[in-house]
Image: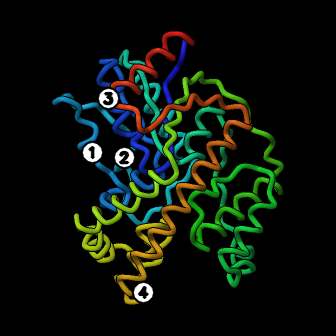
Amino acid sequence: MYDLITILGPTASGKTTLAAHLAARMGNAEIISADSRQIYRGMDIGTGKDVEDYTVDGQVIPYHLIDIADAGEKYNVFQYQQKFWEEYHDILNRGQKVILCGGTGLYIESVLRSYKMVTVPEDPVLREQLGHYSLEELTEILKRYKTLHNTTDVDTPKRAIRAIEIQEYYQQNHIGERDFPNVKSLTIGVKIDRELRRQKITDRLYKRLEEGMVEEVRGLLERVAPEDLIYYGLEYKYLTLYCTGKMSYDEMVKQLEIAIHQFAKRQMTWFRGMERRGVTIHWINAEDSIESKVEQILELYGSLE
């Protein structure tokens, strides 16, 4: 018997809509988000926080771990893992089933493989030592470590330094290998053709710009420091650079589009790595109809229990 269903996939693969339709079909399921940026209040358009996707034929699907922290905070995987288990047990205690859905590989893997997480303090000496390195140099340093860190979202020097800080702490404090899962998940991956994914990413970027993503970032900058928004990467990095006059509009759009494509590629690399680390992922085609994808999941859910 499965403890939960997990739906993962790269950005623009339609995983949230699929999770909502699956929950509606099951009739007794709630969704826990695994998105490292949708947890922040006010960061809506840039993170693709389309909460209307959680309504299916008039039925509102309960969702969790969205809008739980203020923009400007530095929420981490340790905090996420704690909140996930709180929500997970609460949902089960109410007699409902759990669907975990998202694209942040480390968040998902920390649940599926029950990683023992610790709070890592800041290391001012290390930060000073690394402060002059470029993002490319920091990424190369990060690759040297054997322990797990989510390189998917490391697209600013500040985040890369924090990632290295965590790895150094794990090594110096002899944080051992994490335990394998205490939770049994039917894990579904939504695969999407590379060119189709690229087109969807491009179309979605321009749609979000039309919907007011620039205005959203300008509003956030009234209460959040630019460097704190840049920390979140992708849309918030490039739009902040544009809004603060450090990048032209056309250059912002061009660089952001490239960055999102690279991000989606890194997500897929992470998911393939999860498979190598022992997570069984059943891949289904993003281009199949919603009804077909739901049926495929329910068939797997029934046949593999």
Residue 82, percent from left and from top: 53, 40
Q: Measuring from the top left, give residue 298's x and y in whole percent.
A: 43, 17
Q: Which residue lies most toward the left here?
A: 58
Question: Hey, what amino acid is under mark 3?
Answer: His
Q: Residues within 10 Å of mark 4 (few under 14, many from 20)?
A: some
Task: Give the mark nearest the N terminus, 2 or 4.
Answer: 2
At x 30%, y 32%, the residue is 62
In this view, the residue farthest toward the bottom is: 245
Tag 2 secondary structure: loop
Disc 1 marks which residue?
51
Which residue is drawn at the image coordinates 71% and 64% (left, top)?
Answer: 165
Query: Where on the picture, by quarter, is residue 273?
Result: top right
Q: Residue at x 45, y 21 (%)?
A: 296
**Residue under circle 2?**
66
* Quadrant of residue 186 within the rendered picture: top right
Q: In the image, is 144 to the left or to the right of 278?
A: right
Query: CB atoms at circles 2 and 1 under 8 Å apart?
Result: yes
Residue 254 at x, y percent in the picture:
44, 76
| Residue positioned 42% across, 82% down in the render | 251
Q: Which mark is residue 21?
A: 3
